[in-house]
Every structure is written in C-alpha cells, then in structure tokens.
C-alpha cells in the first residue's frame, strides 16, 4: 500500500474536491482519497493495480494536473 500527497493548484472549491474524490475512487486499487481545498492537495492511498502514473494521468485528464 502506498500513500502519496499531490499538489493540485487548480482545486478552488468543494466541487473540485468532490470531483477528484469521485473520479479517483473509481480507479481499481485506490483505497482512499482526501482532497483539500485549503491546502490544494490530494492525499491518495492505493495499491496494485493502481499506480502513481495512472493517478497522475487521470488527474490531468479531469483537469486537475499536479504540480511537483
């Protein structure tokens, strides 16, 4: 199990939070998603078959690209 926190500057409201959480929870292997509008981050816990690459790719697809 891996837990990673991503900086997502485009989080601007609770609708953004709900969208990120909903979309990522649909990914097989994603166990938990907690996005936060105040810190503009998402903390994601996942295991196989989910990968960091798949998560980052999906975030970009739904218009919430990460910033490293």
Image (cartoon, grey):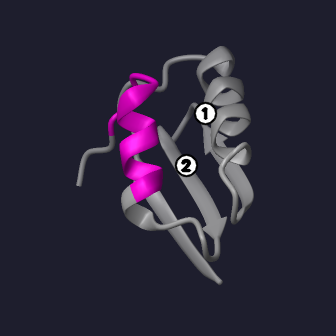
Going from the N terminus, do you reach mark 1 or mark 2 first? 1
Left or right: 9, with 2 as reference point: left
Residue 20: image tag: 1
- Is residue 64 at least partly visible in the picture? no
In the displayed structure, would residue 29 be above or below residue 54? Answer: below
Farthest residue to the left: give it. Answer: 68
Q: Secondary structure at mark 1?
A: helix
What residue span does the magenta drawing correspond to?
54-65
State yes or no: discs 1 and 2 in contact (Cβ < 8 Å): yes
In the displayed structure, would residue 60 be above or below residue 6? Answer: above
In the displayed structure, would residue 68 be above or below residue 2? Answer: above
Q: Quadrant of residue 31?
A: bottom right
Residue 22 rendering spot, x and y as whole percentages: 73, 33
26 within the magenta span:
no
Within 10 Å of the Cα at label 2, are there few (<14), some (14-19), or many (20+) other Cα atoms? Answer: many
Within 10 Å of the Cα at label 1, are there few (<14), some (14-19), or many (20+) other Cα atoms? Answer: many
Q: Main secondary structure of the magenta part?
A: helix
Residue 64 rendering spot, x and y as whole percentages: 41, 29
Question: Which residue is at a point 47% across and 52% down the rendered structure image?
Answer: 55
Identify residue for label 2. Answer: 42
Residue 62: image tag: none
* Distance (Cα) linking label 1 and label 2: 8 Å
60 within the magenta span:
yes
Question: Which residue is at a point 44% across and 38% down the rendered structure image?
Answer: 59
């Amino acid at each position: 199990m891996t837990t990673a926190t991503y900086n997502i500057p485009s989080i601007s409201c609770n609708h953004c939070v709900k969208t990120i959480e909903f979309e990522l929870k649909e990914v097989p292997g994603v166990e938990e998603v907690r996005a936060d509008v105040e810190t503009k981050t998402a903390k994601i816990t996942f295991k196989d078959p989910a990968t960091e690459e798949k998560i980052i790719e999906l975030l970009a697809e739904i218009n919430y690209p990460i910033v490293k």
